[in-house]
Amino acid sequence: MTTTNYDPRVLKAPHPVPGAPDNWKRFFSFNTDAKVIGIQYIATSLFFLLVGGLLAMIVRGELITPPADLVDPSVYNGLYTMHGTVMLFLFLFPILNGFNNLLIPTMIGAPDMAFPKLNAAAFWLVPVFATVLMGSFFAPGGPASSGWWSYPPMSLQNPLGHFINGEFLWILAVALSGISSIMGAVNFVTTIIRMRAPGMGFFKMPVFVWTAWAAQTIQLVGLPALTGGAVMLLFDLSFGTSFFRPEGGGDPVLFQHFFWFYSHPAVYVLVLPVFGIFSELFPVYARKPLFGYRFVAIASFGITFLSLIVWAHHMFYTGTPNWMRHIFMFTTMLIAVPTGVKVFAWLGTLWRGNLRLNTPMLFCLGGLFNFIFAGITGVMLATVPIDIHVGNTAFVVAHFHYVIFNTIGFGVFAGIYHWFPKFTGRMYYEGLGKVHFALTFIGATLNWLPIHWAGLLGMPRRVASYDPEFAIWNVLGSIGAFMLGVASIPFILNMVSSWARGPKAPPNPWRAIGLEWLLPSPPPAENFEDDIPTVISEPYGYGLGHPLVDDEKFYIRRSQEA
Amino acid sequence: MTTTAPKSGPNIGAIVIIAMAVAINLVIAKLMATWSYSWFPPQASTAAPFVDDLFALETGIGSFIFFGCTGVMGWVLLFNRADKYDESDGAPIEGNTKLEIIWTIIPLVTVFVIATYTMNVNMKLQNLGPKHKYVIGTDPTALVESDPIADVGPIDVIARQWSWEFIYPNGVRSSELHLPVDQRVNFRLTSEDVLHSFFVPAFRLKQDIIPGSVISYSLTPTKEGRFRLRDAMFSGAYFSQNQTDVIVESDQAYSDWLKTTAKRPLQPGLDPGRALYDRRIASGDKGWATVPPAPAPMVNDPGDPSIPHDA
């Protein structure tokens, strides 16, 4: 097979912008190649991981002793508000969009995204809203300081009375982030539905593509609610309306409905692609097919559907009537079923495997270990009487970080190490990777496990000072947090030195199965260009002895000769 | 030529190992459930035992699942590692429909059992009154009906940035909350500025206080002592200072306190954020902007923050 067996039903993206630079400068240009955009997203978000981590260090520094003695309490509030916002909107969402950009086209055999210019525009909004958000540090009165959820009426308090203030810039940044994410979501969903290689039916797609699709569907349904709520909040703050102001007859609890309608599912927007990463990596490093592939794929949409009807569990103690609390308790707990299906499937994949414990696999195993724990505390939080006691305490913060860092963060690192050779063309240093994993696993556990007990004892969240009975748990937590800070050093060293001088990577260093591994490392501008392979098997055929695509040897040879 | 018949009958060795693992896991889960009671402050309300029992149940089930799943991971890590130069594949098992259906149904049933049990527990807590919205400037307390089965109250609880004020039916005002033991008390919760939350960890109870709404809330303390009332809903700069004590005492001590306190003149009550705010102003207001604390409430009994609390 030499020339085209190109399926005309597959939507073909326009060529990249003519004359786009082909050297390192491409990462600083309006480049429309999804792989360049993917790396732009990932590099930008890793920078903001450091910024958000630095803010977290100050927060944990404050909490290492009971009194508020490191920073002024209002400064503390600004710091943790910005920590949360930076980590969510400038680290996690962008980095997963980076993965989507790198992986979706290469995994489904598409030359690029469906709308390459929209894709580049979505990325370039990130530095724009990052500047707006960071600019709020210099706004009169300081940055937003009412928590990442920005509940009114406190978020509407504007002590200095300036029109431009931290909260104003914060809402603007969140709205711009929402616009960027919607642009991305339209692109990812269209690409997945319309641009799959010939033969790639939905049940031949890799699970990462399934989970990205499920996650981006949540963005399309949920984000308009948050954006609407944010616009109303901005009107209340800056133009004197009373959607949420009680003095004008507004209801502050209404904002909580808008906020959580999106912001609870947002966690699934983040965790679903990480489930995808786990599902891709376990088969590779256990050398086994993904156990119950179809169940795992369908469970993704089970999570999507349920995630849209759970938001009121954040309001069990706001005066919500019992009948409503019971309904939302049920829907929230039901999410344990599709997530449980996934966990059991991963365990089934590991069972009787032939495990290789290199860095990506270690991060996957660590992430899964933490996620099982987070899932259990999640069910506890869903049950009304427990939530009434531990809601808004450190227990919630600990549970949340077990999901958001100890699971999602671990999945992100696993993905970075796993696909690093493919997209940079270089191998990373395994030793540094393992040091990174060890420090991260111990640091993350020490950071967040003890905080659960502070919460059970009744320590509220978001406090700058606390009673001495909570001290031991917070000291342990802070030591863990500083350890996480130290863990970033081997990671940065590894990434920078490997990309600059690491050994050249072969096209398929892990002997993985998937369309992206049939491409050279790094893949050329339009991936398979017109020679798009015809997919003939389900993914993850480890040990089954059948090829993934028609004429597989041709693609393997071509990738090696490139 | 003879053919080897597929091995039939159960694998006794595997069954014994699995049975032993499950038994050990059950013991650990039971121990974790028992241990979980010690993770809480003392039980000081009628709600607390229900909450702790439910939590112990969930800790037990959760531990069983956690150690079961991570035990499998541990087993795999010990016995299914590839040797250094081993490039072979693992067992090519793609799935098992029966097993997949079973492990979908078991969590589903577990979830339904826990949820049904939780609904029963939640109905027993019996503490949530309806939320009534009122027009700012009118009397919020006129709207809400008090709890017909309460023995004491309604006590008005007013939350501010950053202080608590309690007004008893006989007009006495205090900064610390006094309650008689073993009597159902009804509260009317209001806020004068932003969201706050009425949270007493020893009672295992929490209720948000929403400006523009008045909420009728009831509970029954069951243990004498001095317990911490914490604002659990982030309310701004001095949020972490917004705490006071709940003093649960005998019926006699409570009545005596009400009588003697009624004779005391009004004076400024507890205002824990004030000292920090004054220090900030004195040092040139270097923090990021904050609203100034509300004036200290005028009360008959300002309480004594220096007395250590029990929980």
Image: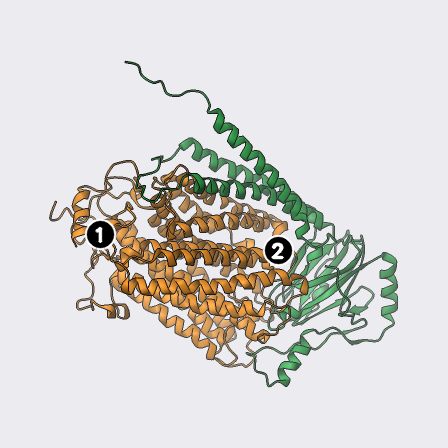
A538 versus A370 height, above or below: above
Residue A468: image quadrant is bottom right
B72 versus A109 height, above or below: above
The residue shown at (38%, 39%) is: A353
Q: CA distance from mark 2 to mark 1?
A: 49 Å
Q: Chain of mark 2?
A: A
Counting residues from the N terminus, which is met first, the one under dot 2 or under dot 1?
2
Q: Tell me where residue A22 appears, x and y as whole percent.
A: 20, 67
The residue shown at (58%, 41%) is: B61
Residue A538: image quadrant is top left
Three-letter amino acid code at disc 2?
Trp
Q: Quadrant of the N terminus of chain B?
A: top left
Residue marked by disc 1: A519
Residue B115: image quadrant is top right
Q: Tell me where residue A42 appears, x and y as whole percent.
A: 35, 62
Q: Chain of mark 1?
A: A
Is residue A179 at least partly visible in the picture? Answer: no
A222 and B54: which is toward the camera = B54
Task: Return the residue found at the far front.
Answer: B84
A245 and A522: which is toward the camera = A522
The residue shown at (24%, 62%) is: A33
> Element at badge 1?
loop
Q: Which chain is orange?
A: A
Q: Tell me where residue A431 appears, x and y as whole percent.
A: 37, 56
Q: Which chain is green?
A: B
Q: Tell me where residue B287 appears, x and y as whole percent.
A: 56, 79
A222 and A470: which is toward the camera = A470
Residue marked by disc 2: A453
A297 and B262: which is toward the camera = A297
B40 versus A175 height, above or below: above
